[in-house]
Each structure stands twice: as structure tokens, then as C-alpha cells.
Image (cartoon, rainbow, N blue to C red):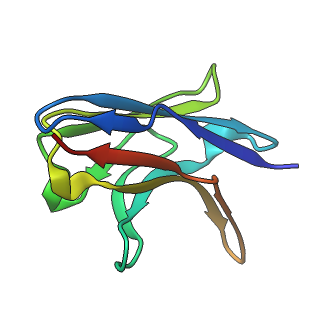
Amino acid sequence: QVQLVESGGGLVQPGGSLRLSCSASGITFSMYTMGWYRQAPGKQRELVAAITSGGSPNYADSVKGRFTISRDNDKNTAYLQMNYLKPEDTAVYYCNAQFIKNPTGYNYWGQGTQVTVSS
């Protein structure tokens, strides 16, 4: 059974930092692209950052220079370090694991963790 469990969300003041963790089980973690998505009330879910199995990251323009995605294959865990947080970063953050090998694809989601940026 595949499980992605996020942790590290919470309430933080503007300009503050949080680190999200995503602990994976039931998959060969090192083979998966790991991503962080977020969904604010009334908005569509959007990609925040992703890191390939080879360790190459990519970021949404809105978080470049503020957020850092990383992974520890020994711990089956992905991280999202969020610095200089803004109120517009407030959302539920979801961990995603994706593996595509044509013609097969696997895509898994965590349950989400709330991040609220407010003074």
C-alpha cells in the first residue's frame, strides 16, 4: 500500500520559514519524481516545485529564490524548505509521487498539510 505522509505545516508570520516533509512508503522512492503542489481556497491546485529521480529541481516562478525542494533517498523523504513566506503562500500543500515508464504511469498523492501565512 502506497502512503505519502506530509508534515511540517502550520501558522507562520509573513517573512517566516517552514519546512515541509513528505515521508513515502510502498514505492521505490528513488525512482519517482517527487513534487509539492498547493491549493488555495477557490483556486486550482498548482505545482510549487518538483525534483526528479536524478535530483534536478524545478520551481514555479512565484516561489523561485524562496523555496527549495530536496530529497533523501535513504530516508524515502522529500522536503520543501519555504523561506520569506508571504500571505499568498497560504494553501493546503500536497506531496506527489510520479513515475512514468511508457506505457505505464503511477501517480500518488498525500493527504495535504495546511500552511497559513498571517500576522
Viewer-side residue, 81 vs 14: 14
Kindly identify the residue that appears in the image at 47 percent across and 31 percent down: 8
Task: Tell whether 98 sits left or right of 78.
Answer: right
Give the residue furthest to the front. 119
Q: Is residue 55 left or right of residue 21?
A: left
Image vertical order of residue 60 relative to residue 7, above or below: below
The residue lying at 18 percent from left, 35 percent from top is 13
- Seen as rendered, the residue at the extreme top is 74
Q: Quadrant of the C terminus?
A: top left
Name which residue lies at 43% across and 52% down: 36
- Left or right position of 50 against 31: left
Vertical position of residue 73 compared to residue 107: above or below: above
Q: Is residue 108 something that shows in the picture? A: yes
Q: How many marks?
A: 0
Can residue 51 be seen by looking at this rendering? no
In percent of width and height, residue 60 lies at 23, 59
Question: Which quadrant holds residue 73?
Answer: top right
Q: Position of residue 48 (x, y in %)?
A: 32, 56
Q: Residue at x 72, y 78 (%)?
A: 103
Which of 111/10 is in front? 10
In the displayed structure image, the side of residue 100 where residue 53 appears, left or right: left
Residue 34 image offset from top left, x and y in percent:
51, 48
Question: Observer-nearest residue: 63 or 88?
Answer: 88
